[in-house]
Image (cartoon, rainbow, N blue to C red):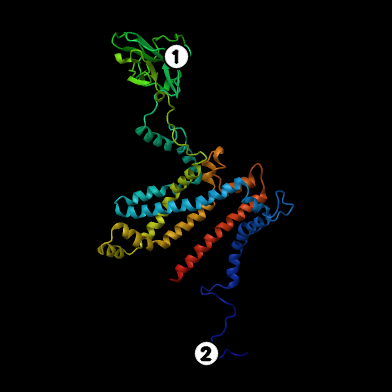
Amino acid sequence: MTSAPAGRPAKPAAYKSVTGTRRAVAAGFLLPALLLLGALVVYPIGYSVQRSFFDTSGDSFAGLDNYVELFTDDTLLTAVKNNAIWVVLAPTVATALGLVFAVLTERVRWGTAFKLVVFMPMAISMLAAGIIFRLVYEQDPDRGVANAVWVGVHDTFAESSGFPRARPLPVHPLKAAGGGAYVTKVPVRSGETARLPLIGVAPAQMPKDARPARDPAARPDGIAGTAWLDFTKGGGGRPNAVDARELGLKGLRIEAVKDGRVVASTTAAADGTFALPAAADGAVLRLPASNFREQYGGVEWLGPSLVTPAVIGSYVWMWAGFAMVLIAAGLASVPRELLEAARVDGANEWQVFRRITVPLLAPVLAVVLVTLMINVLKVFDLVFIIAPGSAQDDANVLALQLYRSSFGTDADLGIGSAIAVLLLLLVIPVMAFNIRRMRREARR
């Protein structure tokens, strides 16, 4: 038996790592995880790639036909286009908001509480967030928060109609004048009483302070009249007659028009009565279209044109807090002396933010941006829940189309597998960039 040469340590019988673990033992512990990884990740990927080259039944080889259809079918093209919008818009907006929140909350006492509130949506599942925003974007302002706010702002600056869909009956002394207005069939004369009955006003749309209508006394030096809802709840009323239970159309605008020119105007009182001066003698009374214009119903957030931005808004609401927390952690490590030195040198806050803070936070911003880009490539829940059936094709994304193509009524596993492979190919460059960036950071 020969001994090892002098000065050289004897080779151990079995190789051990720095932790003292033998390769065989390490492989034994890793084997179950590797088998699970192969069964749940590697095999499905391989099978999806193979299946994407076959037709719907899976019996005939289709070549690249499924991939060609991805970029020729209108529905699939919409999904690809919307995914591009998501990848560009959602991560950028969420990261920008997270950066703004992180920087601004450093300067206020209640910054921690604000961060908590902004981060709280992360605790909500996509399903719950989708249900919440489906209600937020409801078209009816009485139910949808977004339209309630929008309509409130609109009505503050634009006069709303008092009696939408109100109209006269053929037996009434009014006729259509074009453009949604109504005029009296004959001119009015001083000393006469003008009656302007209408129907078609729902009880809920009547002014809350409207009072029972009444016939005013005639005026020898002008025109007196009544504008009222010629409808008796429960029936029993007479057309063209002011009945005891009929209400005045408070706020109805009335114009006296002579030779195509408005010579006088007024509005009806709570009991429907109104008065016009002697200048209205011989004029026709006109109820302008502004009385009957449909009330502003808000924005169709879930319509074909706005559904994708609306769903992206709900995503940003959820993930802006995630971006803020990561960026705030990076901001805490920024050397304060650099910021103070820039301020001493005369830089204003915007210059400090743009030339010092943002460059120092570039690695953190890259992490957040890449993470969100990978996340939005597989967005499914929000689009599926928020977009109504009528607009789901317009809001379609690749992950949703993957579900519809694989499990829908007209399932085509070839197309579904091709979409899955396309998503994988889109994610790989982003992941490769992220890995290279992390290795570059580790070498510093």
Q: Nearer the viewer, residue 47 or 224?
A: 224
Left or right: residue 338 compared with residue 242: left
Q: Quadrant of residue 281?
A: top left
Whether residue 147 is visible to the viewer of this picture, yes or no, is yes
Q: Earlier in the sequence, mark 1 or mark 2?
A: 2
Q: Quadrant of the N terminus?
A: bottom right
Placement of 206 over or under 115, stated as above or below: above
Neighbourhood count class around disc 2 (C-alpha, 10 Å): few under 14, some 14–19, many 20 upward: few
Name the front one of labels 1 and 2: 1
Q: Position of residue 4 (x, y in %)?
A: 57, 89
**Mark 1 residue element:** loop
- Which residue is under mark 2? 7
Q: Amino acid at mark 2?
A: Gly
Left or right: residue 304 compared with residue 110: right
Q: Residue at x 58, y 57 (%)?
A: 424
Q: Amino acid at mark 1?
A: Lys
Q: Position of residue 207 (x, y in %)?
A: 37, 21
- Alpha carbons under labels 1 and 2: distance apart: 113 Å
Q: Residue at x 60, y 63 (%)?
A: 34
- Which residue is under mark 1? 233
Disc sitting over residue 366 in the figure: none
Neighbourhood count class around disc 1 (C-alpha, 10 Å): few under 14, some 14–19, many 20 upward: few
Q: Nearer the viewer, residue 208 or 215?
A: 215
Q: Position of residue 275 (x, y in %)?
A: 31, 15
Q: Nearer the viewer, residue 325 or 148?
A: 148
Placement of 122 over or under 225, stated as above or below: below
Left or right: residue 271 compared with residue 55: left
Placement of 190 over or under 335, stated as above or below: above
Whether residue 265 is visible to the viewer of this picture, yes or no, is no
Number of numbered labels in the structure image:
2
Left or right: residue 349 compared with residue 296: left
